[in-house]
Amino acid sequence: MSRGQAARFAERTAFERHYVKHLSENANPVAILAFNATPPVKRKFPAGARGAYRADGHYIVAPARFEAMPDGAIWVGVFAHEMGHAIDLHGRPADQGGRSIWLAPAIRRDRDRIGERWVAARSRVAGEGREMPEFPPAAHACLLALIADRREARRVARQWRAGRMEEALAALIRARRGAPAGRSPACDPRLQIYGFAVVGAFIGAVYDLARGSGPPRAYYRRFRHLGTPTLTIAHAAEAFANAYVADVLEGTELLSFLVRTAAPHTHAAYRVLLARIAARHDGAT
């Protein structure tokens, strides 16, 4: 759905206005409505700060404009990630977890399958079968737009379908390093690399770094457990925020496919929760 259709990001403040205009025109409409259902965030940016969301004051740490910042358009992705946290956490005590704690059973289901699923995938011989779904046309078109060498694009797709997710993501990042700047900040190669790193961090949060990347386990262990030290409110919160980024950045057709196929139960639960938030009735406790 484009911005000319029903779902449009609300531009309630100058800060929001500057960032949302660089999000994808094909952003998930439910993700847009969840953004609009969340009260506008305030902004702070002390010297030397990094991106963050603070639930106690409902504000995001980010520059008012990213153009003069050394990281440039990467801040568009940081804004999307921190807005994911804001959608999840606003109005709730941060130390008790956000609405995303509702994802915990789905995360457990994905983890329960990890041994069987990925060991089987690694043991397959090329051409004998595929563990992951085929790339849908829109995701495949995005892949071809990002990797000029068609043989390399096919290799990346095969890696992903075989469950070699980290290899596929590393190849996508390599393909964008040093690429010429796009026609707009949304097409900046550094932002595209950030998007693939977010996919890796989503996987890391769901699988407690048995797969994927992202913050170290020591970071997750600092937070309240959801039944076990290996699943905390931080795992759920990071999974939610990273899935949200995949729903709204340019290239969402590819990013959201990667997230969905990497952890299907978690992604399905995230989408249900997002719809509840968008309807201003999240039903989560």
Image (cartoon, rainbow, N blue to C red):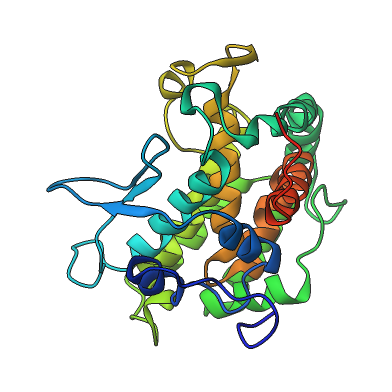
Q: Quadrant of the C terminus?
A: top right
Q: Taking 238 as reference, is 244 above or below it?
A: below
From this viewpoint, which residue is outermost toward the left? 47
Residue 31 in view of the camera: yes
Q: Residue at x 32, y 48 (%)?
A: 51
Instruction: Specify the quadrant of the image occupied by residue 123.
Output: top right
Q: Is residue 172 left or right of residue 174?
A: right
Could you say where residue 71 lies in the image, as x and y percent from the top left? 25, 61
Closer-to-camera residue (123/185): 185
Image point (50%, 50%), residue name: 198
Is 224 above or below relative to 56? above
* 88 left or right of 195 in image: right
Which residue lies at the image location 72% right of the left edge and 34% below the top edge?
Answer: 284
Where residue 19 appears, as percent x and y from the top left, is: 39, 69
Quarter of the figure with the N terminus: bottom right
Residue 213 is situated, as x and y percent measured from the top left of the image, at: 49, 38
Looking at the rendering, which quadrant does residue 187 occupy? bottom left
Residue 150 locus on image (x, y percent): 61, 78
Residue 230 picture quarter: top right
Of all residues, the one furthest to the right in this rendering is 128
Query: Which sits in the foreground, 105 or 197?
Result: 105
Question: Is 129 located above or below residue 21 in the figure?
Answer: above
Q: Nearer the viewer, residue 196 or 74?
A: 74
> 101 and 106: which one is in front?
101
Q: Residue at x 82, y 47 (%)?
A: 131
Note whether residue 147 is visible. no
